[in-house]
């Protein structure tokens, strides 16, 4: 969610990182000392992500853009009538896949929000997207979204698993930032 992503940006900043936060529309204030790039569309998110990744050592995708967009955008308001309206959708580009393809050596961290089979689905996404770490959490039934607390299980491409117990999103972010820092290749 937005709050967790912003908390991760602040936690990485606190560890001394120079952070660029790419954000969709939100009423959240950018953490002090963090450069924010505002985007509105999935295409803008992709372009900003590729530009930021070119200068980065770590890329964290804390929230996904929509998987689909309208195939055609109407130039004028669509007037209501008695008939049902069908809307054609088309896939948006996969930001993580594009960033990974462009920057094979970049250390990449993704998030997975799951309603079932958390480890199976998260490890599948970890492998499919070519990530180094994936932070997975349960959603639905009062969990994660719009809550002040969160908990994560962080899976690594090395087969590791680390549970971050339920705590404030700021505390969860601090622990996740520490896990990322500990796994970064040393120059």
Image: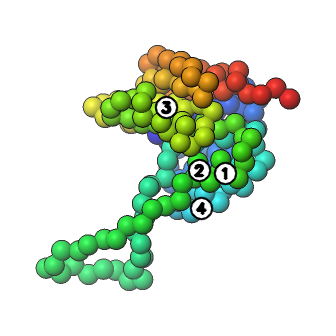
Across and down, in percent, residue 82 comes to 13, 79
Q: Quadrant of the C terminus?
A: top right
Comparing 1 with 184, the one in front is 184
Residue highlighted by disc 3:
123
Residue highlighted by disc 4:
44
Q: Is residue 124 above or below residue 43?
A: above
Numbered disc in front, either 2 or 4:
2
**Badge 2: residue crowd in 10 Å (few <14, some 14–19, many ≥20):** some
Across and down, in percent, residue 124 comes to 47, 36
Residue that appears at 44% across and 55% down = 67
Visible residue check, residue 36: no
Q: Which tag, 1 or 4, sits closer to the chain's start?
A: 4
* Mark pair 1, 4: CA separation: 18 Å
Q: Which mark is residue 101?
A: 1
* Mark pair 2, 4: CA separation: 15 Å
**Badge 1: residue crowd in 10 Å (few <14, some 14–19, many ≥20):** few
Q: Which tag, 3 or 1, sits closer to the chain's start?
A: 1
């Amino acid at each position: 969610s937005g709050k967790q992503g912003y908390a991760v940006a602040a936690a990485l900043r606190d560890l001394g990182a120079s952070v660029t936060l790419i954000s969709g529309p939100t009423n959240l204030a950018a953490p002090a000392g963090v450069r924010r790039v505002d985007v509105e569309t999935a295409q803008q998110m992709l372009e900003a992500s590729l530009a930021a990744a070119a200068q980065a050592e770590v890329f964290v995708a804390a929230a996904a853009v929509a998987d689909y967009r309208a195939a055609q955008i109407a130039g004028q308001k669509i007037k209501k009538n008695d008939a049902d309206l069908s809307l054609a959708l088309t896939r948006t580009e996969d930001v993580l896949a594009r960033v990974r393809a462009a920057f094979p050596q970049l250390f990449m961290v993704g998030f997975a929000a799951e309603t079932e089979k958390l480890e199976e689905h998260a490890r599948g996404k970890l492998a499919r997207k070519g990530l180094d770490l994936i932070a997975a959490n349960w959603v639905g039934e009062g969990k994660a979204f719009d809550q002040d607390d969160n908990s994560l299980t962080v899976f690594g491409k090395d087969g590791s698993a680390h549970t971050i117990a339920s705590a404030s999103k700021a505390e969860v972010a601090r622990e996740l930032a520490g896990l990322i820092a500990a796994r970064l290749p040393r120059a």
